[in-house]
Image (tube, rainbow, N blue to C red):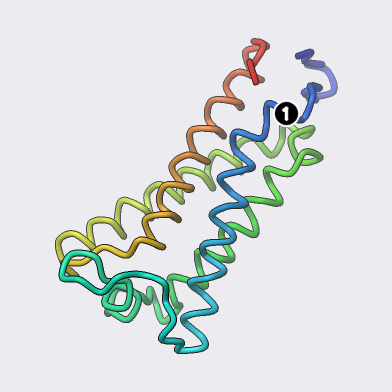
Amino acid sequence: MAVDHDAGLVSSGPRWRLGALIPAVLGLIAAGYLTIEHYTSSTTLACPETSAINCAKVTTSSYSHVAGVPVALAGLLYFVVMVALLAPPAWHSRRLDVVRIAGAVLGVVSVFYLVWAELFRINAICLWCTAVHVCTVAMFAGVVWYTMAARSGETVVS
C-alpha cells in the first residue's frame, strides 16, 4: 500500500477495505428487514418467541424508539451513510477518516446502549438486532484497523 502524504490519498487494492464494507452491507440488509417489519406491522418477523429470545417483544418495546424515531429506521439510515463512507471511492480521501471513525464509534456506543436495554430492561434478545450489533462491532473493528494501518503506511493483509 502506498501513501501519498502530500495529496492525502491512500492507494491500495480495494480488497483490504472489504473487512469494513462487508459488515456494513450486511448490517444494512438486517436493518432494512427490521425497518420493513416495523412499518408493515408484519407478524412474519422471523424470530422465535421464547422468554429469552423474542424479537417482537424487543422491537415493540419502549426502547424501540429514541426521540420518537424508530431504532430500526435510525439503524437503516446509519448503515446507508456508513456504506457510502466505506465504499471504495470514499477510502481515497483521508479527510473522511475522522468521519468514518466517528460513525463507527457512534455505532458501537449505540450497540452498548441497545444491548443493555435488551438484557436489563426488556429481558429479551432479538436475533435480528443481534445480527445488526455484530455487524456494527465488526465494521468498527475494520474501520479502526484499516484506518490506522493506512495512516501508519503499513501493508494490510487481505
Location of residue 11 in the rendering, given as x and y in whole percent from the top left corner: 81, 22
Within the image, what quadrant is residue 4 found in? top right
Within the image, what quadrant is residue 50 found in? bottom left
| Front residue of this view, candidates 151 and 43 | 43
Could you tell me which residue is drawn at 67 percent across and 11 percent down? 155
| Front residue of this view, candidates 129 and 10 | 129
Image-based side of 58 in relation to 145, left or right: left
- Compared to 57, does 154 lie above or below? above
Which amino acid type corresponds to the residue marked 1 in the rendered image?
Arg
- Compared to 77, does 22 lie above or below? above
The image quadrant where one finds the N terminus is: top right
Could you tell me which residue is drawn at 43 percent across and 54 percent down? 131
Numbered circles on residues, count: 1
Could you tell me which residue is drawn at 43 percent across and 71 percent down? 71
Location of residue 20 in the rendering, given as x and y in whole percent from the top left corner: 59, 38
Kindly state the secondary structure of the residue where label 1 is placed: helix
| Front residue of this view, candidates 48 and 133 | 48
Badge 1: few (under 14), some or many (20 or more) residues near its Cα, within 10 Å?
few
Residue underneath mark 1: 15
- Compared to 142, does 42 lie above or below? below
Q: Residue furthest right?
A: 7
Location of residue 98 in the rendering, given as x and y in whole percent from the top left corner: 60, 37
